[in-house]
Amino acid sequence: MLELRNISYLVDDENGRNEIINDVSLDIREKFVAITGPNGSGKSTLAKLIAGILKPTSGRIILDGTDITDLNIDERARLGISFAFQQPIKFKGITVRDIISLASGKKLPLNVVCDYLSQVGLCARDYVDREINDSLSGGELKRIEIATIMARGTKLSIFDEPEAGIDLWSFQNLIQVFDSLREKTDGSIIVISHQERILNIADKVILLADGKVGSFGEAGEIIPSLANGVTDVCSKIPGQGEQTIG
Amino acid sequence: MARKLDQIELNMLHEIADLHQIPDGAYNIRLNGESAGRNSTENITIESKTDKPGINIIIKPGTKNEACHIPVMLSESGITEVVYNDFFIGEDADVVIVAGCGIHNCGTDLSEHDGVHTFHVGKNAHVRYVEKHYGEGDGLGQNVLNPTTVVYIEEGGRMEMETTQIKGVDSTVRETTARLADGASLEIREKIMTHGKQVAKTNFTVDLDGEGSSANVVSRSVARDESTQKFVSCIRGNNVCTGHSECDAIIMDNASVSASPDLDANNVEASLIHEAAIGKIAGDQIIKLRTLGLTEAEAEEQIIAGFLK
Ligand SMILES: Nc1ncnc2c1ncn2[C@@H]1O[C@H](COP(=O)(O)OP(=O)(O)OP(=O)(O)O)[C@@H](O)[C@H]1O
Ligand SMILES: [Mg+2]
């Protein structure tokens, strides 16, 4: 499905060259893969590299045998990549109905739009004509973002922390959403998450640490290692690693 | 009726008044400087002025849920005119007035329509005033529209004014002045898009004289190519009142937009706010729509269409 070959992404900042993603190679064939890892480990960066929002400094990206490294964002989108942002984008005047229609590529009848919204737990009637702006809460924006990706129905869907801002009560529904997405797709779903309950339903879990693949395996193997502090955030901050107290 | 409207004129009628044919109810159609049809109803009387070009529209007190259409069309090149229309909206009336001006200029001469509209909104009356400006034509002649709107709102009266100018007007200077009595309110929503070398200037001057009066002036605009826009809103709070004005503009290419607020609070209980935001289309909005499969140009189009909706 998706193959990353020696992907690196470097930025120049005040500390000189910084390897945000460091020689990542992955072969994703499973239906449902979760990516986890500490804050700042490069998860969102990796997702943006796959969606074409960022261009790798080196390495190749292969989708179903086609090298897509040199394709831009919309070319990749049309080849079947969808990406739900960690922080959904707000607009002025574009409504929920507009964005879901744009995502599906055609003008959708009202009942179809409502159906997507109901699936993510939003009372459709109250939301279809709302503008996607600051008047929507963080959790509502995240749910609409998920509905948008469902409406696209592409072979590869990437969700960046879909659970963020979703209340606990609705969490079970969210799990159901991903279960049913997995049922329907003949492609792959990649979910970036910090939530054990999401990692648990994944076929494989990728642990990203410091821009590198720490491990890639079954949820049952990876999750116990998370508790053992493999993912120490401070090791990334220069100087902090050496500090010892007492 | 002077004569039947031709296809170009019907098309303009659709653009400026959302009408596919001669409307029901009260209307007055002005075509190339002459009346092309008029209808008064039991509650809405339309009559010609005797001292200058224009009409009086008199709406009886208590008239509810009626509409009045007064489109103006110039389909011959080289007509320039100044027209005075006065609206008298009786107490407790609740009506919609749809005005609009379309210019189809295929010639090389200047076509200009300057409309001066004066509204007298009676006590507790409510009027929604919709005005659309539209120009077209493949000639070299300039299309010029200079609308002036003067509004007086009596106690408890309410007016909503929506003005739209999306296409084809080379030069426009819009002057709107309003004076509000106790408890009166005014809401103005303006939408403008300019292209090429077009120039659009808008001046709003609102006097909040009455206790508890309020005004909200919102302008959304898009300036493309080499066009220029200037937005001035002056709100004077002369009593316990609230005033808000907002200018939100997208600039593209080599266009320029300027927004100047002018707030005068002449009473300690006056609360006046101005907000202005001018900038290019947000890059992350374009990226988001591209991840849905739209090209950059398609994404821009959707963002602008939404913005001006
Ligand atoms: N353009 C940039 N310039 C400098 N540093 C950057 C740039 N983009 C990202 N980074 C850094 O790269 C690291 C990875 O960021 P990224 O957003 O991918 O993390 P993440 O794993 O998604 O974290 P989180 O769990 O908080 O969402 C962070 O330390 C971030 O500060
Ligand atoms: Mg992230």
Image (cartoon, coloured by chain):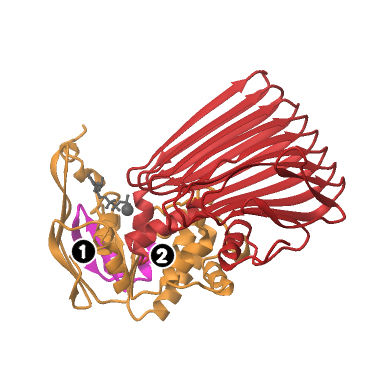
Chain colours: A orange, B red
Element under label 1?
A: strand
Left/right placement of residue B80 relative to residue B200 reads right
Can you tell which mark lies on residue B176?
none
The residue to which callout 1 is attached is: A215
Left/right placement of residue B23 relative to residue A140 reads right
The quadrant of the picture occupied by the N terminus of chain B is bottom right
Q: Is residue B148 above or below residue B45?
A: above
Residue B286 x %, y %: 36, 55
Residue A123 x %, y %: 60, 64
Left/right placement of residue B86 relative to residue A172 reads right
Examine the image and state in which quarter residue A187 appears. bottom left
The residue to which callout 2 is attached is: A197
Examine the image and state in which quarter residue B208 appears. top right
Residue positioned 69% across, 33% down in the render: B214
Magenta residue span: A195-223
Examine the image and state in which quarter residue A64 appears. bottom left
Three-letter amino acid code at the position of disc 1: Ser
Tell me the chain of label 1.
Answer: A
